[in-house]
Structures are given as C-alpha cells and as structure tokens.
Amino acid sequence: MAAMLKPPGNFSVTPHKVSVCIVLQIYAPPAQITLPFPFPFSSIAQHNRLGMFLLALTKSCDDIFEPKLDELITQLREIGGELDHWLSDHLTCRLSSLSSPDDLFNFFSDLRGILAGPDSGVVVDDQIILDSNSNLGVFLRRCILAFNLLSFEGVCHLLTNIGTYCKEALSSCPTYELPHLDDSSNEVEALLVYENMDLENFVFDKVTEETEARKMASEKVSFHIHAPKALFGLIEDIEVSAELKFKHREKTGEASSFAHHMKDTLRGIDPNGGIFLRTNWQIQGYLCEQADAIEKHSCSFPLNAFESILRQLQKLAPELHRVHFLRYLNNLYHNDYPASLENLHCYFDYSAGAEGFDFVQPTSSASNSFGRYEIALLCLGMMHFHFGHPKQALEVLTEAVRVSQQQSNDTCLAYTLAAICNLLSAIGISSTTEILGSSYGPVTSIGTSLSIQQQLFVLLRRSLKRADGLKLKRLVASNRLAMAKFGLTHVQRPLLSFGPKASMKLKTCPVNVCKELRLSSHLISEFSTESSIMITDGVFSTAWLKNLQKPMGSLVLSLENASGANSNAFHFCAQPNSIPGSVLQLLGSSYLLRATAWEIYGSAPLARINALVYATCFSNASSSADVALAYTKLIQHLAVFKGHREAFAALKLVEEKFCSISKSRILLLKLQLLHERALHLGHLKLAQQVCDELGVLASSVTGVDMELKTEASLRHARTLLAANQFGQAAAVAHSLFCMCYKFNLQVENATVLLLLAEIHKKSGNAVLGLPYALASLSFCQSFNLDLLKASATLTLAELWLSLGSNHAERASILVQGALPMILGHGGLELRSRAYIAEAKCYLSNPSFSVFENSEVVLDPLRQATEELEILEYHELAAEAFYLIAMVFDKLGQLEEREEAAASFMKHVKALENPQNEQDPLFNIH
Amino acid sequence: MSSKESCRNELRTAICQLSDRCLYSAAKWAAEQLVGIEQDPAKFTPSHTRFQLGSSSIRRRFRTNEIASTPTAGVSSVSTPMLEEDEAIDGDFYLLAKSYFDCREYRRAAHVLRDQTRKKAVFLRCYALYLAGEKRKEEEMIELEGPLGKSDAVNHELVYLERELSMLRKNGTVDPFGLYLYGLVLNKKGSENLARTVLVESVNSYPWNWNAWTELQSLCTTIDILNSLNLNYHWMKDFFLANAYQELRMHNESLGKYEYLQGTFSFSNYIQAQIAKAQYSLREFEQVEVIFEELLRNDPYRVEDMDMYSNVLYAKECFSTLSYLAHRVFLTDKYRPESCFIIGNYYSLKGQHEKSVVYFRRALKLNKNYLSAWTLMGHEYVEMKNTPAAVDAYRRAVDINPCDYRAWYGLGQAYEMMGMPYYALHYFRKSVFLQPNDSRLWIAMGQCYETDQLQMLEDAIKCYKRAANCNDTEAIALHQIAKLSKDLKRSEEAAFYYKKDLERMEAEEREGPNLVEALLFLATYYKSQKRFEEAEIYCTRLLDYTGPEKETAKSLLRGMRKAQSGFSSIDIEHLPP
C-alpha cells in the first residue's frame, strides 16, 4: 500500500491569494463596471511601485509560508506611501465583506473583468489592461481556475479560512496557544521581539496594551524575517525601512535565525492558527532543504524545535513519510541512537524507500515490486558507521551488497561499495578475520591472501569503475577523493605475490594523489553546463527564503589582518546557482584533502592556502564539521608559525562563530593547543590533565577513532618525556608503535619512531636512539613526509652530536642538509631547534674558533631566542641563552654575557616554578 | 463486594440517570451487568431462571476455584447514585433538547439549552456540542482530503468546551458527568495528566459511568500510571482494573479479577467475553471456543468480540463454523468492522487472499485504528508475496499500538523473506521484548540468526535456549540447540540437549526423523566416550527403525561388541560405519 501522492504543483486558493487578488483589482480596476472606489493613485511611479510589489507577491506565492494579513498590510504600508491607509483599509474591508459563499463567487467572477479578453478591442483611455499572458495575468487566471475547481465544501472552507485570517489580524488574539518550543533560543527571540517593538507599526490603532502583551507572549510577531525580505529583495527601487531590522538579525547569529525560521514554519503549518497547508511538493521541498540544513549544521540544529514541527507535520500529513526520514536525520545528528534507529526503520517500512530518495535516478527501475529496501540497508549501515559501530555497519552493508545484487540495483551497489570503502579506511582493522565474519562477501571474495589494505585498494578501484560505468558523477568524484586519501598514506605493492618480481620502489606516489584530486574536481565543469539532476523543484520554490537565511556577514574569519571589507565579495555564494550544493561540497572536500596532503608532505604554505580557499569559497556549501576542520588547520598553522597567543586569539573567534557546532573538533584543537603550551611552559600537571581529557574523547570501541587515540597517547608520551620519566615515556611510545603497526598507520609510525629517538636522546642513550631515528627517516622517505624527514635528520644530527665532538662534522653536514627544508616550511620550534643544533655543531667542532667567527654562531642563536620567546618555550630558550652567554664569555664581552645569563636565569626559573606564572590563556580552559 | 441486591439497585438507578443524560453506551453497559446479576430464585418465576440456567453450566465447567459467596472486599465510597436534582422539575426545554439529541440533531439540542444553568442541562448542552463537533470533524475529514492526502480536521468545539468546563470546575459547579466530558475533551487535546486527574474525580464521585472508566483506562499506558491513580473503592473499580490489566497484558491478573466478579455477575455476557479475551491471549483456544458458543446461544445477534471468536475458529481451521459465523454477523450488521473482519478471516482460511484483503480493507475503512485488521492484512499480503504492502500494513499496526508484538513479528518475517535477515533482527528483537514468554517468537529469531547469510550460531543458540525455557509446545527449540551444538563441535552440550529432546519426545510419544537423529547422535557420542552400555541401548532402539540409520546402528554395535569381547579396549580400531 504505497503512499498516495498527489501530483505536484497543486495550486489552491488561500486567503492570502484572495488578498493578493484584491490588491490586483486595485492595481488594475475593471473597466466595464463602475468603480466601487475612486482611482486612488496620485502618480505613475506610485502605481508602478504597487505593480512591482504585486509581481513579487505572485512570484513568492509558491512559498511554503504565506504571510499573514498583518504582515501583508505592513508591507503595503511601506510601499504605499501616502496611500497606505487607504490601501490597507480597502483590503481589510473587502476581505471582511466576504461573508457568504455567494460573495466569493461574485468576487471571482468580477476578477475576470480585469483580464483583457481577446475581444477587448475598444480600450478606454486610461484603462490599465492586464494581459492574460503576463505574470500577473497568469496568476489571476490560476486563482480563478482553482476557485472554479473547488467543490461547495471547498468554498465553505475557504470562507472559514478567510474568516480566521482576518480575525487573527484584527484581534491578534491567538485562539490556541502556540505549542511551546523548549528551545533555548526562545528567550533571545523574545528579547528580539521586544527590541523590535518600536519598529513595527501596528496595523490597527485600537490595539490595546493587553493584546500587545499577548502578542509578545505568543511570539507571533516576528514577521519581518523571511518572506518580506524575499519580496524586498526583488524590488530594488523601494527603499525599505526594514534594513534596520536586518541588523538585529545578523547580530543574533545563526542559532536565532533558525529559531525565526522555525517559528515561521510553525506558523505556516499550525493547524489552528493560520492553517495554510502547502502542497505536497512544497513540503517535500521544505523537507529537502531542512535535511541539507541538518547535515550542514549537525549538532547546532535545534533538535526539539524541529522535532515538534515534524511531529505536527506528521499529524497533519501522515502519508508524507519523508517526515520520518527527517526525524531520523535530526536524531542522528544529535546522537540519539534509539530514536534514529526507530525512525529509520519507520521511514523505510512505510515508503519502501520509494518516496523520492535523492540519489536514486528516476530512470532506474521505478516500478520495482520489491521496493528499495537495499537503500534502507545502506542508510542503516551508514548510521551504524556514524555511531561508531563498525561491526554492525559492516554486517548491514554486506547485506546491502547482497540485496542490491539480487535486485540488480547497480546504483545502490556502487554507493554501498563506496560506503564500505569509507568504513574500511576510517576504522582501523588489524586483520580481516577479527572484524569480519565469514559472511563478509565483497572482501572475502577477493581472496584471503591479501592484506586488508590491499583489499581496500581493490575495493576502491572496483567501486570507482562501477560508478564510472553508471555515470554517477558525484560518486566518481567522491571515489576519486577516497583514492587520493588512500594513496596519501599507503604504499602500493603488487597485488600478486607470485611471478617475476618487478623491481618496485616502495614509496607512496604523490603524483597519483594529485591526479586523483584534480580529476575529482573536474566534476564542477560537468555541472556548470548540464541542468541539475536533483529534484530541485520543491526546493526551488523555497529558494527565495533560502537566499536570505544565509547570514550575510563575513563568514571568513579575519584571522590574519584580513579585514571584514572583502568578505562582501562572497555574497555570490548566497545566490541560488545552478551548481547543486552536494557538488560544491565535494569540490570543497577536495580542497580540504589537498590541504591535508600538503600538510603530510610538509609544505606549510600550500596547506595553508588550500585551507584558506576552502574556508572562503566553500564554507557556505559544506557541513559545519568540515568548516571547523578547515579553521582548525588554519589555527594550527598559526600556532606553529606565529606562536600560541595568536592561535588562542583566533581560537576564541572560531569558538564564538561555532558556538555549539561540532564541539568535538574545536574542543580537540583547544586541548591540543593547551597541551602544547603547557609543555612549553613546563606546566606538566596541566599537560597531563589535558592529555587525559583528550583520551576520553575517543570511543572505547577498538578500531574506532584511531586518529584520536594515537594523538592522545602520543601526547601522553611527550608529557612523560617532559617530566623526564624516560622509561615510562618509552613504554607508552612503544605500545603506541605496536598499535599503529597493528592497524597499519604507517605515517603515524614515523612520528612515533622519531619520538622514541627523542626519548633516547634525552635520556642520554644516544646510541640507542640512532636506530630509531634512522628507521623514522626511512619511513619518512617512503611516505614522502619531507618536513618530518627534515626534523628526523635534525634529531639524527643531535644524536651524533651528543656522541662526542668527533661526530660534529657529520652532524654539521646533516643539519646543513636539512636546513633549506626547515627554513622554508618549518615552524618556529623546528627552526629554532635547527639554529641551536647548527650553533652547537660549530661550537663542538674542535677546528672552529669562536674568536674568528663569532657571528656564525651568534646569529643563529639570536634568531633562535627570538623565535623561542614568541613560543614561550622555556626549556629551549634557556639552552639558547646559555649558549649565547658561553660564547660571550669566551669572547670576553661581559656585559652581553650578563644580559644573556639573566635571560637564561629567567627562563630556568619560569620552567622550575610554572605555578607562579599567571597566564590568562589557561583560564580559557 | 456489596450484596447483589444493592448492586442491582445501584445499577437500576444509574441506568436511568445515564440514559437521561444521553450517555447511551454507558447505560447499555450498566444494563447488561444488571441482567448479569444472578437472580434471586425465590422472587422470580421459573421461566426466568431457566433462561439463565444454560449459562451457569459452562461456568461450572471452567471455574476451578469456586469463589465463596461474595466476601466484602472493601467499603464502597458511594453506595447509591445520588439524585442531586429533583427529576420532577426537569424543564420542558430539557425534554425538547433530549428529543432532538435522540434524533441526532446535536446542535439543535445544544441551542435549546443555551440559557439553562442547571448541571444536567449544562452537561447535555456540552455533550451535544461535543458530538456535533465530532460529527463535523468526520465530515471534514472526507471533504479536506486535500493535497496532502490527509486532512487537518479537528473538532472545533474542543476549545470552547475546554474553556467552559474548566471554568465550571473551578467554580465547583460541575457534576461527575461534566467532569467526564471535561476529561474526554482534555484527552483529545493531549493534556493527559490533567485528563487523568479529572477522570479520577469523576469516577470517584459517580462510579457507574463505564464510559468514564474506559476513557481513564485508555490513559493508563503503563502499570505505574495505573498504580498511581487515587481511586476510591467501589465494585466498579474491579471491572476497571480487570480491563486495565488486560490491556497491559497482565492476563492472569485480569482473569483473576473477572472470576472474582463472576461471583456477583454470574450471567454477564460482558464478563464472559472478557474472560474469553484473556484466555485467547493465553492461547487457551478450547476454552475460548466453548465460551463463545455459549455466548452466541444466549445472545445470537452479538457482533462485539466475535472477531476474536473468528480468530479462534481460524486457528482451529473450522471452516463451516467460521462460515456460519460470518453469515450470521453479515445478516446482523453488514457494516460493522467486526463483520468485515470475520469475512476476511474466512476467505483467508479458504486461501483466497485477494478477497480476504478486500474485506480487511473494508473493515479498516470503517475503523482505521482496527489493530488486528492491519496485522492480519499484513499476513495476507505476505501470503500474496507482496512484501512491501505487508510491511506497510504491519507498520501501521505498530504505529497504532507499539506494543503489538504480532505486527513486529510480522515485520521481521517479511524482511527475512526478502533476504534481509540482519535487518529483520531489529523487529524480532522488538517482538521478543514485548512478549518474552512466547517460544514461537524466540524460535523465529533463532532461525533468523541461523540463516545462511548470517550464520550467527551462538546467538541462535541463545535464542533457542530462551525458547526452550518458555514452554515450547512444538518442541523445535531443543532439537535445534542440539543440532547447532553438534555443528559447533560441542558434543557434550549436544548430547545433553539431544537427551533432553529425546526424553521429551518419549513423554509425548512422538516419533519422526528427529527421534532417529537424536538416537544416532547419542549412540555415536557414547561410543566415542567409551560408555558402551548406554551406546548399546541407543543402538538397539535404532534397530527398530528402517533406513540407513539401522545399518549404521548395526555396524556400531558390531564395533562395540568386538571392542568388548576379548581384545583390550584400548588399541581396538573402530570400524568405519
């Protein structure tokens, strides 16, 4: 029993349309009949303005939300000039004079008179003729037609609706209380209303204080938000006093703009208050739009407010099953597992997945008696993935593969394969057998001799091929991204382990990564020409609103000194364009991936530029989590190159912007920064505390949140190292290495090995440290981690140095070799370490004489101290100052020596008594 | 419980008052109970008593513990219906209004009473308005089947009624009937807590209004809510509790209450039907059938509850009785949802699923919240291999009552049929959660775990164990556990369960392949354990059966004999079977 859907584009007469018709009648008074009112316009301009207004009204009449009478009247006043009272009075008079069905019949037959009939040869001089093919004419004809199609009952209903429509405006007295939203932004909203009170002209002079109070209480007056703006946006030559109001809105930020939207929606579908149900198509569009919004804003999307709207919608339209899907999405992004599970099942039980699921092309076997339950499985799998249940997710996705093969739904199969790839690459799998049951089809069919990584590679290639064959452009692009991601961290090995062995360079292939990335962004060129495939019609009718919901203010943070002035340049993003949001999102993630790739390969400027491109151009189209990621990258860059003060300042801005959104990503960044800084300042207790907090963020399931887990234990080891607990630090690092090895995290391995080398260096066991440093170097080489390689080289040099002065030459060569890379791309810490190492090489070289060439040593040391001061890295700074003091001592420049010694003293003291330092930055925590 | 005579008097007065206020269904219910009280044989002519004798026979047959003559369980708070206003001065307007009401001209009735202030008149006015609103709502539902396929029709009178009645309540000028109406309105408007309070007030001051009790019952969705109600004692409360227990699936408690009530109301058809309902839930079909036969003899034109009778007949595959029943209800009232349901059941039994669906649909058209019709329609669609439609029908049932384990089970089955066993598990889990003592559900879930695609045998065994613990009448569970344990190479466990299964089959004197399988396994198992005596017993038993197993048993026996005679049992080579 599939849902019975009415054809789209249902045009029904509503009270609002009746009022528009009345205004139309004023605009173009019928010729034959003697006017019941005098021609009111004093000037042509005034008349034209009304015409423009009407045009805008008719264009926006397909909106989900229709303005109420008082809103309409307010708008009329704004354009009416001196006519305002006359217009609105006339409108209300006309409306209230419609008291019997016969009045309505007469009204609509009068309306015919406005239209220029084909026989209207004789034209009276100053008569305004409405061409029946013009916009206004077509609107009028549609209204008349819709009215004529109404049954008598329908006419009666229209009459009652008009009654309520008028009554509401007149008394502003809600018969029903609005369902109370338990949304925190309510208070903000109430305040806002209060602020705006003076801006709003009440329509009727006799509004008593009581009704005012009621209005405020019921929060029904927030009318200035969407629809009116849509209208005013169209009419350029009308100067609107509403400008003022907009500013209020922008200030309150995203959360409250949602609230407004909610309210409008509520009003739109509130059965007792306004009652204007929209067509199915429009509601579908609205729901699509909301789905996008949920995915974009995830947690910050108001859960309860939207839930209550959905519940209401469901009550009104039980046959509209997509509501269940929206409820699922809403719950999913608020991490409510039972509710989302329930709603997902509910949605697919009802609609069998047949009710316009976006990515299913209408051409593919539409009349499938089986339904589209494979999509249900796909969704369920992705849900489990989202909640971090990899095992269940794999089971379900396997079932999805099987069912879509049975139903020969290739599209779904391609998507499922892509989902499995995502899953496999996102979770750490040590071995196939551990996590995959014997039933695991797609992977086991390849053959068990391959490692999981190789299987993933094969799967990726298959999935890409399939998507290419099916011409699923978006999927191809996202598969290419997955390939690039895979190529970034994996060395390709030959799949066959027999036959003649070709000589293989065991290295990752950055060229391939670049190629995949470039290919994936070809997607946009395909969409710029082709008409979009997505079902946009429903969405498009709400595009008027969508346009304005977008916060007009600057989205790009003025992280650097970039002023807010150029942020206006990004307004174009807000215009509805032909490129679907999902494409933009994909394109954006390719930039984000580029940034990550450059980060890994070790080019700081390129990474930064890509992150910046993303933050400026794609932040509108992409999800808040991704935007947060881009900002995170930028801030990390700041922290590394400009020191922590700037980074914390930027973090503060970002935190404000995202208020509650994607807490985890920003929170993670904050913890990372805090930890880094605590280490530099020698606040070891705090560092440990932050470290523990970081560890708690990760899920407890094995294989999930690997990134976080490695991060946490890496930082743990570093804290221990800073506390000079070498044995423990080495143990932690060792177990981390084992874990990374088990889950095939090679890039992390390089870092861990380097850390081990550091630990041994610090503990004075340089000989033990050497093999670790060398191992790390070779890892870096095969994964093309250039910056990390430079840093490993530096560590190697330091190790040699600590072995004695006879290795100084070798160390010097190593440092010199790494210097170009470090000075070009390295951060403050790395650079100063290199400077110090360079100086040390000179100093410990027996053939080097300070007296001859003191600047060679002093210059890098000075550089190092400068940079370390910015970083507030006490330990290294003390070392640098110590060296400077020694050099000056040798040179016999006592004054400078004392100065350097004093600085040394300061840093050592700060390091020893970290508590004494009153640091405002820590208070953020 | 109060004496029969006092009950009788209370009910007599109540019936007059209820029908005076046009609460006809409550009056009907009260009258049924009035007649259900056992008559004092001294006062009545033998013809009367003979009319009632028939029913007592079945009562005797099934009542295990005869309740001693009506002990007083508590003191009723209200003894006789009070007559708060003098009936004599019933205004002429009231009489007019009531006659309009009786002719279903509700608005007219309300209009006549517009200026009346007496409680009775106010109640009737409000009640008439409420019904008028309901009627209009029904009409609008059809008119407004607008672009969304569904209307937003509401009873427009609710707002007014709520305001009016809450004001009356505040002033203290509202009678229990008004409170009942207020509770009804509140429930419709979704303020359930207040509705409960108001209804409790109503039934505490006037317990004979069954409508108020049923309304209150619909608000008791959990046992906690039920227990938290502050109800005064009255014998009507027992009826309420019995009904509420039943809806909360506490069938034994409910049965106890009804049997207790039968002490006074020994001829009540209502109680008999309710007992049948409880027995049906406990799957005691024989008893249910007898009760219904009796009921139909006494009350041949009854349509209520006959759908359940048809289910019993369906389960017992009584073609002709079911067709007779269908014919009878069809002649009595064709447009009752129950009638259509019974006919649907009949066609289903005949295997004509398309026709059956037509009638279930008709039943649903008449009452779209007819739970079991949705579920059974789902079953029909499953039979017709139209799984999406089946899923849809089941889901509707579940949405009407999320505690309907049959529909959850149906959903699971449908998905399993479509080859989505993992997806189906979700539904099976739901159904076993709601009905944890039903072995069939556990077995279905176990089978789902066992499917080729999933092969989650451990979980399957767990399910079967649960099934075996809750009285698995079809004896599938034990056998399955044994088989799965064998497949998982846990022979000790397998032997334990095979033995249990065997004992059971012996007790029930059942034969079949399962028996042979068990014997064969046990024989080989004991032989491998070197417990030859036991092995021999099983082998000899196997010899009674024909087929390849007999030969295997023979060779096993031969092997064991060899092992025991002469040779030391250690280095004997086992003969291949």
Image (cartoon, coloured by chain):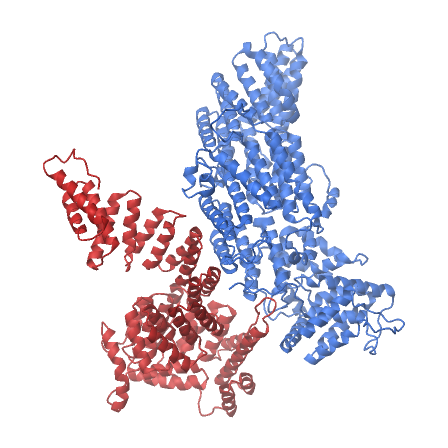
The residue lying toward the viewer, choosing from A905 and B108, is B108
Q: How many marks?
A: 0
The residue lying toward the viewer, choosing from B178 and A686, is B178
Chain with blue colouring: A
Q: Is residue B442 left or right of residue A762?
A: left
Identify whether A620 is placed above or below A749: below
Looking at the image, can residue A641 be seen? yes
Would you identify the image quadrant in which residue B53 lies? bottom left
Q: x, y (%) of residue A33? A: 82, 78
Q: x, y (%) of residue B164? A: 54, 77
- Residue extending farthest to the left is B566
Q: x, y (%) of residue B270? A: 34, 77
Would you identify the image quadrant in which residue A787 lies? top right
Query: What residue lies at 50% left-to-right and 57% top-to-bottom?
Result: A370
Which of the image's four quarters has the C terminus of chain A? top right
Identify whether A28 is placed above or below A517: below
The residue lying toward the viewer, choosing from B358 and A665, is B358
Identify whether B110 is placed above or below A909: below
Would you identify the image quadrant in which residue A58 lies? bottom right
Q: x, y (%) of residue A485? A: 57, 36
Query: What residue lies at 48% left-to-right and 16% top-to-bottom?
Result: A767
- Residue extending farthest to the right is A125
Chain with red colouring: B
Looking at the image, can residue A335 be seen? no
The residue lying toward the viewer, choosing from A528 and A722, is A528
